[in-house]
Image: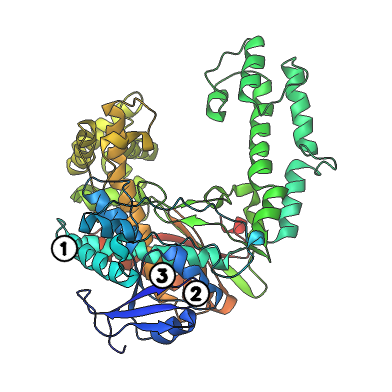
Amino acid sequence: MVGVTVIAVVADGSGGGVLRPLDAAGAQAGPDEPVADLAAAVAARDAAGPRWLWGCTEQVYPPLLERGVRVRRCHDVELAEALLLGYAGRYGEPRSAAAAYARLVGAPVPADHAARPGRPPGDRQGTLFDDTPAPAEAPGGAAPLDVLGTVYRDQLARIAATEHPQRMRLLVAAESASALVAAEMGHTGLPWQARTHDEILVGLLGEPSPVGGPPRRLAELSGRIAELLDAPGLHPDSPAELRRALRRAGIEVPNTRSWTLRAVDHPVIGVLLEYKELYRIWTAHGWSWREQWVHDGRFRPAYVVAGVVSGRWATRGGGALQIPKAVRGAARAEPGWRLVVADAGQLEPRILAAVSGDTGLARAAGSGDLYAALAAESFGGDRAKAKLALLGAMYGQTGGAAAPALAALRGSYPKAWTYVEAAARAGETGGLVRSWLGRTCPPSALESSWADEGASGRSRGRFTRNFVIQATAAEWAASLLATLRARLWDTRAELVFFQHDEVIVHCPADEAELVVAALEAGGKATGELLFGSSPVRFPLTVAVADSYGDAK
């Protein structure tokens, strides 16, 4: 298979499979090759640089990783199909290879498999392949490799027919690379020191109860809340009970969320806020969480690429994207290694500058602190006012205190304002909007996927206003991951954590400088990859530390 551009892969569920070489157009370029050991066969061929074609990275790649096999590139049919369906205004239709094939031949379309729940690493047992769902049968009993090849050729044609084919190709490639990264991070895990975690929890919560129930500090706070509200037996974690107790104390609130309570002047509020924060840590990242999700010194969540409509990642279990700052000190590098933590500051405002083509905003985004540059140029040096205006434009906060700042923004940066306004107007009237590379928002009929039932057109407009920015920011981040992974391929460094605009690399101490350089160069290269010669900069704040908590 020397010189082959693409190799289609079908696993047989027993460790073997069949390979088929394809040319750049997706046509078969050689005979099928049955292999008894799929991992060994893939490892032997990956150095030649083919793009692996398979139905779903989440199903095919983890067994290869268990055997120590990594691949450089792939084309994930399911992720590509989801993007192309969305582009056609058909968001949410079945996206498996079998479903795509059925649509092509006019047969009944099989439903997608239900997403598998994330499983804690301690629950992994049995063979490497026993939890991989069987692929849906293709219409007419078509061979799985024929299905893959046919769907792949159709996807190439549909990509070529989009308004910006090169951008869509980049999006599909970045999404597929993200799937590889997500599987690798789930396999490798974020280094997590149980003893440090215990020390942090005891310092925050007090000793755990020997008979179950809340730890000492939570029990003390609960008693103090009940005392201040004259409500014996109150369970402060119950919103209904808490609202009733507050009402009896003369405090009327629409809900018991922290930001609502902060507006109330009463001695109980400070105690309540402390309780809510500590309760969240105890239930979401306490001792039970650690026992369930941290094994062999690593935290291994189940990441879901494009699990949110904007393209952002999600997780199925483990709460990886909401690790509170209070417990991040437990994420510690192994002896002789370091954590390199990088985040792209002010990413979404910089994205707006790049996609809108507003020369004034792009000039400000060419500096280290975009808000300070805006303030100096158009807001009389008031950085807070400049930030309020820009965030208001992106998130639809157009009234109240934001109104004067927005008026200044409209006058100084009209193209940026027009860009988000056009997206909002399209959303309000039920139209579709797209990110820079081509991810498309769901149609208005599916608006309940992001908003409350009965949401108005204005609510959808606020969503689409931000979608064009947030989705492009997700594309920038996915492209950065792909770029960074390629730059670190021949090192010992491990990509171990990612959320939205932040990435963590675990590396030997003597490779830390190399990783920092790769991140800085990768951020610059990613901006150029998406936006060409735009003056907008995407600087990364990079810290080398022993623990995640020390990096902030």
How far apart are labels 3 and 2 at the CA level? 21 Å
Rendering coords of residue 10 (x, y %): 39, 72
Mark 1: few/some/many CA within 10 Å (<14, 14-19, 20+):
some
The answer to whether marks 3 and 2 mark residues whose Cβ atoms lie closer than 8 Å is no
The one nearer the camera, 538 or 434, is 434
Mark 3: few/some/many CA within 10 Å (<14, 14-19, 20+):
many
Identify whether 455 is placed above or below 534: above
- Residue type at mark 1: give it: Ala
Q: Quadrant of the C terminus?
A: bottom right
- Residue sitting at x 54%, y 22%: 255
Left or right, residue 198 beside residue 114: right
Q: Residue 484: which disc?
A: 3
Element class at badge 1: helix
The one nearer the camera, 317 or 155, is 155
Residue under label 2, please give it: 64
Mark 2: few/some/many CA within 10 Å (<14, 14-19, 20+):
some
Element class at badge 3: helix
Quadrant of res 456: top left
Question: Of all residues shown, which one is farthest toward the bottom?
Answer: 2
Question: Of all residues shown, which one is farthest toward the front?
Answer: 140
Rendering coords of residue 273 (x, y %): 64, 30
Rendering coords of residue 125 (x, y %): 64, 65
Identify whether 473 is placed above or below 399: below
Q: Residue 399: which disc?
A: none
- Residue sitting at x 25%, y 54%: 107
- Residue type at mark 3: give it: Leu
The one nearer the camera, 421 or 67, is 67
How far apart are labels 1 and 2 at the CA level? 31 Å
Q: Nearest to the eye among marks 1 and 3: give it.
A: 1
Q: Residue 160: which disc?
A: 1
